[in-house]
Amino acid sequence: MSEFEPKIVAFVCNWCTYAGADLTGTSRIKYSANVRIVRFPCTGRIDYMLLTKAFASGADGIIVSGCHPNDCHYTSGNFYARRRWMVFKKICDFMGIDTRRIVFSWVSAAEGGKWAEIVNSTNEEIKKLGPYESYHKLSTQDILA
Amino acid sequence: MARIGVFICHCGENISATVDCPKVSEVAAKFPGVVYSIDYKYMCSDPGQSMVVNAIKEHKLTGVVVSACSPRMHEPTFRRACAEAGLNPYLCEMANIREHCSWVHEKGDKTDQKAIDVVRMMVEKVKRNNALMSIKVPVTKTALVIGGGVAGIQAALDIANAGHKVIMVERDPSIGGHMSQLSETFPTLDCSQCILTPRMVEVAQNPNIKLYTYAEVESVEGFVGNFTVKIRKKAKSVDETVCNGCGLCTTKCPNKKIPNEFELGMGKRPAIYVPFPQAVPNIPVIDKINCTYYKTGKCKICEKVCQAKAIRFDQEDEIIEVAVGAIAICTGFDVKKTDFFPEYGYGKYKDIIDGLQFERMASASGPTSGEMRRPSDGQTPKKIVFVACAGSRDPAKGIEYCSKICCMYTAKHAMLYKHKVHDGTAYVFYMDIRAAGKNYDEFTRRGIEEDGAKYIRGRVSKIYERDGKLIVVGADTLMNAETVEIEADMVVLATAGVANPGAEELAQKLHVSYDQHKFFSEAHPKLKPVETNTAGIYLAGACQAPKDIPESVAAASGVAGKISCLFANNELTREPLIAFVDRTAPPEYSSCTGCFLCQPVCPYNAIEREDVKDRNGNLIKQLAYINPGLCQGCGTCVAVCKSKSIDIDGYTNSQMYYEVDALLNS
Amino acid sequence: MEEIKKIAKELLAENKVQLIVGFEKGSANKVRPAFFTKPEEIDQLIYNEYCIHNIALYLKKDICQKANNLAIIANPNVVRSILQLASENQIAEEKIKIIGISFEGKCVGLLDFKAAEEFSKTQPKGIKPEDKALIEKIQAMPLEERFNYWVEAFSPCIKCYACRASCPMCYCGKCNVETNNPQWIPVAPHKYGNLEWHMMRAMHLAGRCINCGECNRSCPVNIPLNILSYMLSDFILDEFDSEAGMNAVFTPALSVYTSVDKENFIK
């Protein structure tokens, strides 16, 4: 049996992390191909329901990333996002949703190296955790049951 | 039905060396809704773009996915190509298979699969893209210039000379700013007043410029092209329309012992005063705090002597509302005072002065008529010490940055001193001589080589008084850090340039960002140096960071250029990627509940309350309304809205949902 | 009780309000919410220990919306709901008279918003010891067990939306669960749809829930929904020092931020 390759979805803001990931590319820093990037204007725009949607659709891990505090292109979107993540993480923890599978990070447009590290470390972590079967099962088989 | 075209770019070998482009194209052709799929060596080249254009026409495409480099690179290129073919440019999306794929992954099935997934995701997104029209907003072709220093003057004159109206607001009774206080200017040593005064007069006489002195910005509302500004005209206690500027009142005022701000406390002024003889406008103001009449209710001598009958003791502050299309912030800087330095006696030694005070001393119109006389006893100092970097580049003092202008003005000061006191000795303690600029290094060299200023590389640890002399203790780091002790008659501290008091408050009124030192922040340090993050608000001069005169003037002309560009159009065109609140038919009007929890999260105050009323004017419902002129498209409100009544074009709920869906359900 | 009736009667008799929201006797020994428009109807008004429904719910219904002014018999939960609704621009002070009643059933007379805020602060907060114990029990479970606990707890959910219908803060005209294209939450009452529905509801109430417990009380299959909100309210009070239902002018925790919000979980 081949090695488990996690499906990782990254929700990133356009101005910092997306640009940071562009820089990873221009710097030719290699990282795992298991990640798929979804571009948003700002972390403030990222709806937590897309995160559960991603898990339900088969993601094993999620990265949410944007501008460092005070760097937000829109001045404060990331601050509202930060609070929302805290509360979302809390409710997920309480409901038994595996928050080890959700990685939050700040990656600036200058941090191409950091982006590669975040993806790789998330990939390794999710490999250890294995496929997110309990959630996938819930959203697929149990519907039919 | 969607008819999507997919265009896979090889980017030479940048993509194709890693990603199997023909395979991606082949797979993409089978995606639901895709009617055309092709790969090509250089999609961004002319023939590549023509392929897109032709395919749109030939296959009646309703959406285009260009799978190539980052959208941050070529999105505008391909959107233009779509527009050329008659397809709405916002029906084009890019799938990033270069920066996010071929450049960062190894060749192989996993990488090919990723490229396929990314294309599928963008196909699903583009199916849900809306045709958008750029947003047009009208422009009020009047500029507000805040601050009447050299930057403000330059900006105002340039904008006015381009044929636009300008409103200038200056906090002090006269325009001129710090430049009007300077004696000579580097690197040419021409007289500051001589070059500035004519420009000040020009401002006053230009029919396009409306000048409000002794006035401050009270509030700012609105957005680019359409600001409403309230200006507080502080009461001058003098009727400007009647006063003829004869100045008799200032000579007759019995209270003449007030420290003169313009002379930085080195001279005195009366309670009714013009700050300096060349002031524009030449209209005195009454300093209410020190005026005998305001303090005791008796005096009114100025009123008695005024032949024009211009004195108005009962005048009150006036609020004026103006409509402007653009704002230039030119509020300048301040310098740290000598009392900031414990090691130099907290300002208790009279003969330790700051650079601006030295300027006044060296100025022909200053308190000593340009003669070198130290403040304590009026003697000519025979030994003078200049201390550069007083506060600057000193993280311990909280001023990490270089104040930039001090190296040059200290060299100038040493030269001016030597020109006036031929037998005197000038010492300069410095960390580095930062004299980058046209003719700048030559200038500092002249000070050292021709005028004989003695430069000592090292810092001054302390200054104290002994037998009427100031003992300056420092180190000479070029001489093994040997201790140097100089018995000086006078010391000039090149104190750090800092943000103006009130800068923070003004930034908050204008909703522009500022850094930790309270200097205003530019939108981009390199590519948008005179813009702020708020559209329509610009920056010039030392309110942004310490700047010298040429730089301030250049930035001011830059701002004027930007504003003239803005005013060249009757309407502004903006990217339509902004948020909106849904509207439906009555009796619902919208799914918006009017909870306004979105309102506080908007960084641009773009969310307004809209009243839905019946024909009799009764309120039916209050709904959120997003002002398209103000919204910058961050989408934070979208994620906050519980009823999903807000959505954002370019990143709609539906687009994002199906993007994620497409990624995983393959 | 007599004092409540007296106030209510006077308000109607003197035309100070058009409508009073309170309780009347229901079938058997039960009570039910009722609307009074005439002074003589007030004889039917009752208030006893069974009057626990959060009748602030009706403030967003047509009957109350159409009244120019009204009064409401308000226990602390109702008072807190009114304050929270006011902070969310859903009810105006000039429209409503609050007849305040403490948790012990003591009438404290008419409250304006300022007095209501004081009253709200002095009254005990809702969480019951058994709920607290349940929260702690769940938190102590290993991850997988916690997940299974909730999946099982939600499995009897038939998506009747009684939790939503009984919640004064669930006043959206079009609930997110009814949004299609995209269909964010599956409407079918299967385990997955139930989990996401209840999670979304908890998120929507985060920082806004006044912890009256109506969702739990109204749930026909006894899902402990209230503890989701209790747990979050506790967290939000701890982390952000923010508490719903205490002030008529208030911005809930998720519509504000501070520069010192925790970020030790962000890489």
Image (cartoon, rainbow, N blue to C red):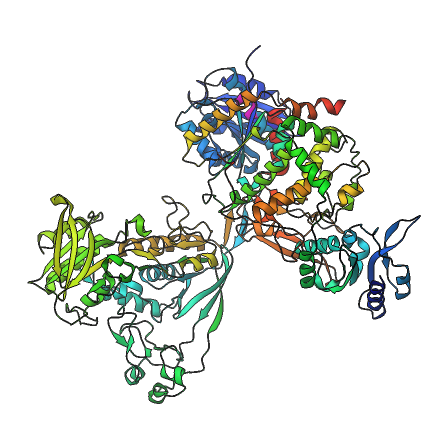
Q: Is residue B513 left or right of residue A144?
A: left
| Residue B412 x, y percent position in the rendering | 17, 57
- The answer to whether B523 appears left or right of C37 in the picture is left
In this rendering, the answer to whether C221 lies above or below B532 is above
Q: Is residue B275 above or below residue C5?
A: below
Of residue B139 and residue B372, the one placed in the foreground of this image is B372
Name, please, the residue furthest toward the top: A1
Q: Quadrant of residue C247?
A: bottom right
The answer to whether any part of residue B62 appears in the image is no
Identity of the residue furthest to the bottom in this view = B304
Image quarter where the N terminus of chain A lies is: top right
Give the residue at x 69% y 27%: C148
Task: Identify which residue is drawn at 24% across, 71% down.
Answer: B266
Number of numbered discs: 0
Please provide percent x and percent y for residue B453. Answer: 11, 55
Q: Is residue B115 magenta?
A: yes
Which of the pair A123/B313 is nearer the observer?
A123
Q: Position of residue B391 (x, y in %)?
A: 27, 54
Foreground pick, C113 / B589: C113
Q: Quadrant for the C terminus of chain A, please.
A: top right
Q: Quadrant of residue B196?
A: bottom left
**Residue C157 shows up from this direction:** yes
Q: In the current view of this chain or complex, which residue is farthest to the left?
A: B423
Report the magenta stretch's main SS: helix
Q: Position of residue B416 (x, y in %)?
A: 15, 61
Compared with B385, C258 (above or below) is above
Q: Which residues are magenta?
A: B114-119
The front one of B78 and C260 is: C260
Q: Residue furthest right?
A: C28
Magenta-drawn stretch contains C245: no
